[in-house]
Amino acid sequence: MRVAVFVDVQNIYYTSKEAFGRSFDYRKFWKQLSSEGDVVAAKAYATNKKDDGQIKFQDALRHIGFEVKLKPFIQRSDGSAKGDWDVGITIDVLDQLKNDVDLIVLLSGDGDFSLLLDKVSSESDMKTRVYGVRSLTANALINAADEFVEINEELLL
């Protein structure tokens, strides 16, 4: 089985922290997924704050096998922040439709991606799997995926 993986890093970070007070374990995830097939594409989408901890984390992702895509972190004058990768993830997933991939794996709880998974299902034979924190993952996304895997103790640091 050929697998393509797409990680909404901010979403996974914040939902894992909120639900469990712990971080997602990308090494365990990679090992688990690699045992099922050949990971032919793996992209992690994050914001770039340029702090040491974040740089070490991004280097660790690269070492595991992820291509890390960074977008500048923008702090607005009202205190809110912007660093959304939804469009970039969508474009990259749709680009995978041209390739010989059996499974699209998305790590996110963002319901906006339900439309994307519906499109993948209607235009290809690729299966879709979503990993997310159940209580913080949109039902629309869970329902759009062929399979939903709940992030739990097994996938946490």
Image (spheres, rainbow, N blue to C red):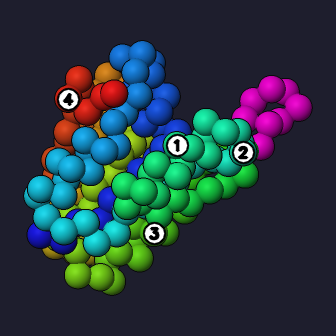
Q: Are marks 2 and 4 in contact (CB under 8 Å)?
A: no
Q: Amino acid at mark 4?
A: Glu
Who comes first in sequence, dot 1 or dot 2? Answer: 2
Q: CA distance from mark 1 to mark 2?
A: 11 Å
Magenta-colored span? 74-82
Q: Position of residue 60 (x, y in %)?
A: 46, 49
Q: Amino acid at mark 1?
A: Phe
Badge 2 element: loop
Q: Amino acid at mark 3?
A: Asp
Q: Position of residue 148 (x, y in %)?
A: 20, 42
Mark 2 Cα shell of 10 Å, populated few (<14), some (14-19), many (≥20): few
Who comes first in sequence, dot 1 or dot 4? Answer: 1
Label 3 vs label 2, nearer the camera: 2
Q: Which residue is mark 2?
A: 50
Who comes first in sequence, dot 3 or dot 2? Answer: 2
Label 1 vs label 4, nearer the camera: 1
Q: Is residue 52 magenta?
A: no
Who comes first in sequence, dot 3 or dot 1? Answer: 1
Q: CA distance from mark 1 to mark 4?
A: 20 Å
Q: Position of residue 9 (x, y in %)?
A: 48, 44
Q: CA distance from mark 3 to mark 2?
A: 24 Å
Taking depth in this image into account, of 53 and 140 the one nearest to the observer is: 53
Residue 119 appears in view = no
Q: Which residue is mark 3?
A: 92
Q: Based on the displayed image, in which of its 4 quarters is residue 41 positioned?
A: bottom left
Who comes first in sequence, dot 4 or dot 3? Answer: 3
Label 4 vs label 3, nearer the camera: 4
Q: Position of residue 125 (x, y in %)?
A: 16, 73
Q: Which residue is mark 1?
A: 57
Q: Which residue is mark 4?
A: 154
Label 3 vs label 1, nearer the camera: 1
Q: Amino acid at mark 2?
A: Lys
